[in-house]
Image: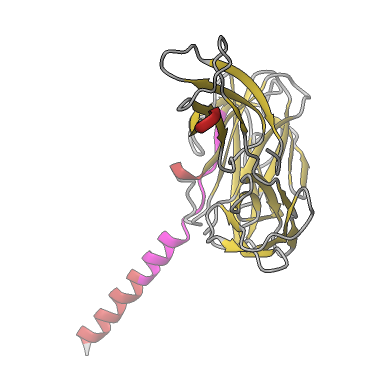
Amino acid sequence: MKKIFRFLQILFLVLLWGGAIAQAPYCTPTYTTGCTFGDGLTLFQLGTINQAIACNGSPNAWYHDYTALSTTMTTGTAYTLTVQSGYSSTYMSLWIDLNNNNTFDAGEIFVTGLNCAASGTNYTATITIPAGTTAGAHRLRYRTEWLAAPGGPCTSQTYGNSADFTINVAAASFGTLTGTVTNSVTLAAISGATVTVTGYPPVTTNAAGLYTVANITPGTVNVGVTATGYVPYTGTAVMVGGTTTTKNIALAPSPKLGGTVTDASTGAPVVGAYIKVAGVIQTLSVTGGVYLTNPLPFSGLQPVVIGKTGYDDFTTNVTLVGGQT
């Protein structure tokens, strides 16, 4: 019985000790001089947080616990941080405890040494919470130092101030990209075109030229469209979580280049001359010096070189128009 009681005592102490470790508090940043001369931030804006910061506070004059103030940030979305300092050459770094282990780990720094070169001036940085971050509340900390970036989230610094805020992380909701692909000349729908959003499986347009790509993470994505007989399209789309973005795309029909190659001295047709468009040989001249390329995968002003052994190259620029020869 005594052994059982002793075992229960030890188990209870182990549980208490483990709980104490799990609840270890965040370190408190310290400074030797602090913001006495105006060093440090005087304004911190991020999302719905808009906090003026004075050179006072508790537990010391240079640290503020603003964790009662919070803003929501969606994973994968870029947010603009705006700060002002009270003294020139104030450098700021910022951490977010993504794994909520009460420690600002090396991989949790989001801003490193942002230089507030002049006092009372807005300086900005972009913060994006990575996909996969656990939803819920996370602690954010900034620190400043004069003339150099702070040495860390917990180190003793000379000049500056620090504050903690709360970030409520929300998982990103996905967006949908849809639209129609048409012929830029005839405006007719193009069926069978391949639409590719980088990082997602390609889709094919239906008989009405319609395409839909679902479950896209919010942000700017690259979009490419290809179809036989048309110049490929590349562009971007801005995706917003929980909404459908419409992007209609008009493809230019592939142009062709044709003509006749002749001897500049005699006017006789030249057979076997190569026709190089945009640096690539597209075809050779045949009987009568005639040539005609296959549909070209580009349009607009393009360099053309025509040549054959025993002749000087002929070079020019030609404007290729979609659907025309």
Residue 222 location, x and y as percent? 61, 47
Residue 85 location, x and y as percent? 72, 27
Tell me: residue 134, above or below residue 223: below
The image quarter in which residue 111 lies: top right
Residue 129 visible? The answer is yes
Q: Name, please, the residue furthest toward the top.
A: 265
Tell me: residue 81, above or below residue 225: above
Where does the C terminus fall, quadrant-wise?
A: top right
Membership of 28 in magenta stretch:
yes
Residue 297 location, x and y as percent? 58, 41
What residue span does the magenta drawing correspond to? 15-31
Tell me: residue 91, above or below residue 178: above
Residue 138 location, x and y as percent? 59, 55
Tell me: residue 14, above or below residue 8: above
Membership of 26 in magenta stretch:
yes
Foreground of the two, 255 or 297? 255
Foreground of the two, 260 or 112? 260
Residue 173 visible? The answer is no
Q: Name, please, the residue furthest toward the bottom.
A: 1
Foreground of the two, 108 or 258? 258
Where does the N terminus fall, quadrant-wise?
A: bottom left
At 62% from the left and 18% from the top, the residue drawn is 316
The image quarter in which residue 300 lies: top right
* Left-right relation of 28 to 13: right
Foreground of the two, 294 or 9? 294
